[in-house]
Amino acid sequence: MAKFARKGKGGTPAISTASLPDIVFMLLFFFMTVTTMKEVDLKVHISKPKATEVKKIENKALVKYINIGVPIKKYQSKYGKEPVIQLNDAFANVDDIGPWVDGVRADMDAENRSKMTTALKIDKNAKMGIVTDVKQELRKAKALKITYIADKTTKKDFF
Amino acid sequence: MARRPLQEINAGSMADIAFLLLIFFLVTTTMSTNTGMQRKLPPPPDPKQKIDETKVKERNVMVVLINKDNNIAIKGKPIQLKDICEKTKLFFSNPNNDTNLPEKKIKDIPFFGKYPVSKGVVSLQTDRNTNYEKYLQVNNELVRAVNELRDEKAKEKFGMKFDDLDKDKQKAVAKVYPLNISEAEPRRIAAGVGGK
């Protein structure tokens, strides 16, 4: 009988995809180490100001955020268009800051309490009135280490 | 029919699982690399303690005002943002011991011995309607002035930039040029500043 020559395994040999999972796992591990779980949904719109004398935040666990900005469209009907304060997930008043600091402190152990930094993420168009009120409340609550969140920029863009 | 001797585990779905996990992490996490300008607030004023404002001599204080129209004035004279750094550096360093600029106090600092440290304080005051960005920019310039002075001193004494020094040397240089920026108790600023 005539032997039918096998036509070959379907033409040109297919590209081996055996290493595809390896590549994907590597990407996965990269993302697992580099990123942090998003804790808070930002309910206010903040455009960060620019500054040159900024440093990277070390020890992210000891940094607690206070966001001040204009509420996003969804909440504008209820909360207006003026800058408001957002603590954790909810809108707050200036008076809520004191209890919030105490609550946050209670979650930390004693040695870390003094190293706690409050990061103020404030929209660049906010007025100083609300910022000063927040700072006064932080002073009363003895949370004296603060950071103003800003994007690093070179001198040329600054002026 | 003879069974194939080795049942190979189909590894085709491993890639799918990996992709799923990857997309999960992409969606739920943020690469939050927030940078910020670190400052320290003064402790709250003690209501029992009388605030003795006259103790500080006028030459030792540089008052920086920002009014609601975002005009900046130093010691009553209007000034532009880019000139603040130079003026502040001169204020804190006082190289010629000018009597209009702050006094110096001899302090004992490691690595430097007995060194005259400026008693100067910058007092930054804003109006309630001042723009936050403007305030931060002024703050940035003041901090930049001190950082540049520290860099110069570090290069002069140790031959390295301030950030490259080790902890003890950094502390010593920081004592030579302390970040004496105080923010006064808030009050309203007269509209006349800079508006003329």
Image (cartoon, rainbow, N blue to C red):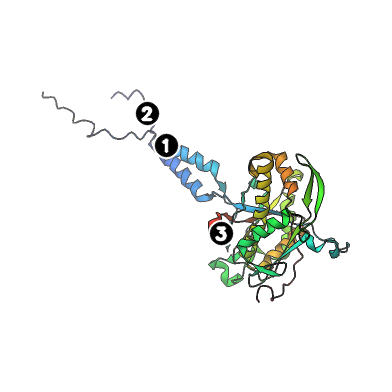
User: Which of the chains bears the disc numbered 1?
Assistant: A
Q: Is residue B166 in view? A: yes
Check contact, mark 3 vs mark 2: CB within 8 A: no
The image shows residue B146 at horizontal and vertical percentages of: 68, 53
Quarter occupied by residue B62: bottom right
What kind of element bears circle 1? helix
Mark 2: amino acid: Glu
Residue visible at 11% across and 24% down in the picture: A2
Residue visible at 69% across and 41% down in the picture: B157
Residue visible at 65% across and 51% down in the picture: B148
Q: Is residue A153 in view? A: no
- Gap between marks 3 and 1, in whole Å? 45 Å
In this rendering, the answer to whether A97 lies above or below B163 is below
Mark 1: amino acid: Pro
Left or right, B102 with respect to A127, comes to right
Mark sitting on residue A158: 3
What kind of element bears circle 3? helix
What kind of element bears circle 2? loop
For marks 1 and 2, give the one nearer the viewer: 1
The image shows residue A91 at horizontal and vertical percentages of: 64, 64
Q: Mark 1 vs mark 2: same chain?
A: no
Read off the residue under disc 1. Answer: A21
Read off the residue under disc 2. Answer: B8
For marks 3 and 2, give the one nearer the viewer: 3
Classify mark 2: residues with Cα within 10 Å, few (<14), some (14-19) or many (20+). Answer: few
Mark 3: amino acid: Phe
> Foreground residue, A26 or B190?
B190
Mark sitting on residue B108: none
Classify mark 3: residues with Cα within 10 Å, few (<14), some (14-19) or many (20+). Answer: few
In this rendering, the answer to whether B71 lies above or below A121 is below
Q: Quadrant of the C terminus of chain B?
A: bottom right
